[in-house]
Image (cartoon, rainbow, N blue to C red):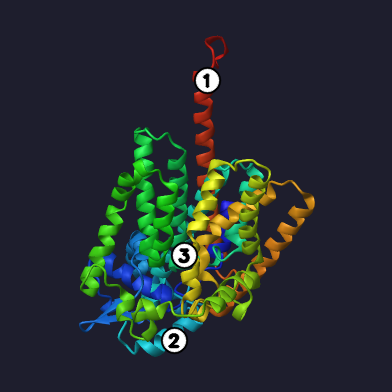
Amino acid sequence: MLASCVFVWVANSGGILSSNDGSHLALGRALALRGEATIDPDRALTLEVDLAERGGHAYSDRPPGTAFAAVPAIWIGDRLDPIARARAVEQAKAGERVDPLPGPELYVQTYSARAQGRGASLVDRIASSVLINLHAALVGLLGLVLLRRLVARAGFDEGAQLFACASLGLATLWGPYSTALFAHVSAGTAWLAFVLGATGLRATAADSRDRRTVMIALGTGLAGAWAIACDYALILAVVPATLALVPWRRWPLVLFGTAPIAAATLAYHGAAFGHPLAIGYDFQTNFDFARERGSTFSGSMGEGLWVTWGLGKGAGMLAQSPLSLAGVAALVTAVASAIRRGEAPSETLRGVAIAALCMLPWVLAVALHRTPWGGGTLDHRYLVPLLPLACVGLAWAWARESTVLRVVLVALAGASAVLVWRHFLGWHEAQAFARAQLGLGAACVVALATLLATSEREDENADEGASAAPPDQAPR
């Protein structure tokens, strides 16, 4: 299942898609290659759209968390760019089609028109474009692994785990946005890691101080901070979820865990925008409303909810991924039905429900955004971090063992997969499965890694079983 998702993601990746991921790449290059905040040499990657200016220098207006995580991939891509360029030149001289391209034709044409000689030729960024696509897929894959762990901890069987993960990866916006360096899947994976850690801490003994508990607490803090560094608005979910899920005795450790990414983010803000609490949107060059939080979140609540959750502009969950909406409804139903029967839901399922409830302020903030449809993408991408929790609801629905319900879920999944991928490929005018060979290679690597990990885990379980067996029953 993991390999299948990676194949679909990488095969449908297209390099640099827009000003959004171009801005993340520009910031990542500044950090990885020059150790600075200004993106002056790579300004053209933003298409003069997702751009901030201060003191005569250009900066990315994006939160830095996505670029922080992509630094290794960007560094490797830069080392491979000359090789990729030479190969592209040879292909062109031989009259062959240059493959892979650094981006879809729409992006390449816009870049050429707006760069006006101020940036490098995109042929110099071919390897970088491939590496950031692979990085995005890796982050999305990590999210699937975390989701499966969360669903398993909630007590659902392997079939429910597989359906939840396949749904997230193929039939929601998680899949399309695991093909490019946008912030949403990075934020969602970090948020999911936070929820997994927080629910784990909730289940530990109050006086436990073993090394594993300490590491979980530190990791939970790191994940929460990283989610906020990718999507500033997620502070509206992370803080209340910390208060609601994490035992108060763990708060100091969780807070300490936030230190590395919080310090890096504040230091970047200071270097780029003159103050640790100043952000790129404060200096946005194109969208006046983005420079103030009050004007950024001054939209209509009703319209925003209809756009993100309903059929507004053809962008919402109901319009593009009804399976996602069904997952949210199923999560609510799971908890409500347990309460109605006088039963307590599992501790993990209760924690997931609490985490979803703590996302409500963030969901409302997204609805109040001036462009809740994501600008030119016309979808509900801002809600991507919520989707893994919705898929826990899908796991519960699948586990009901109702044939009719499963048929409905599969039908919804199929329809949603067609809708989300058709729309995503359409807005940047890309051909489906244009990088099938690269996708197949990535899938083979994931399949091999999965087999090795499974084999090693089985060996460990066998060793534990042998050591626990009575002497006369131990393997010989």
Position of 78 compared to 340: left or right?
A: left
**Quadrant (top left, top right, bottom left, bottom right) of the C terminus:** top right
Identify the amino acid type marked 1: Ala
Q: Would you name the residue on which mark 1 appears?
A: 466
Residue at the location (22% across, 69% down)?
Answer: 270
Whole-Å distance between the Cαs marked 1 and 2? 64 Å
Q: Nearer the viewer, residue 374 or 87?
A: 374
Local crowd size for mark 3, using a 10 Å CA cut-off: few (<14), some (14–19), many (≥20): some
Q: Would you name the residue on which mark 3 appears?
A: 361
Residue at the location (39% across, 77% down)?
Answer: 123
Tag 3 secondary structure: helix
Whole-Å distance between the Cαs marked 3 and 1? 51 Å
**Count of numbered labels shown in the rendering:** 3
Q: Residue 439 location, x and y as percent?
A: 54, 61
Q: Nearer the viewer, residue 353 or 16?
A: 353
Tag 1 secondary structure: helix
Q: Would you name the residue on which mark 2 appears?
A: 110
Disc marking residue 45: none
Identify the amino acid type marked 2: Thr
Local crowd size for mark 2, using a 10 Å CA cut-off: few (<14), some (14–19), many (≥20): some
Q: Residue 464 location, x and y as percent?
A: 50, 24
Task: Look at the picture and state if 168 lies above or below 257.
Answer: below
Tag 2 secondary structure: helix
Q: Residue 124 location, x and y as percent?
A: 36, 75
Identify the amino acid type marked 3: Pro
Q: Which numbered mark, 3 or 1, is in the foreground of this view?
A: 3
Residue at the location (51% across, 35% down)?
Answer: 457
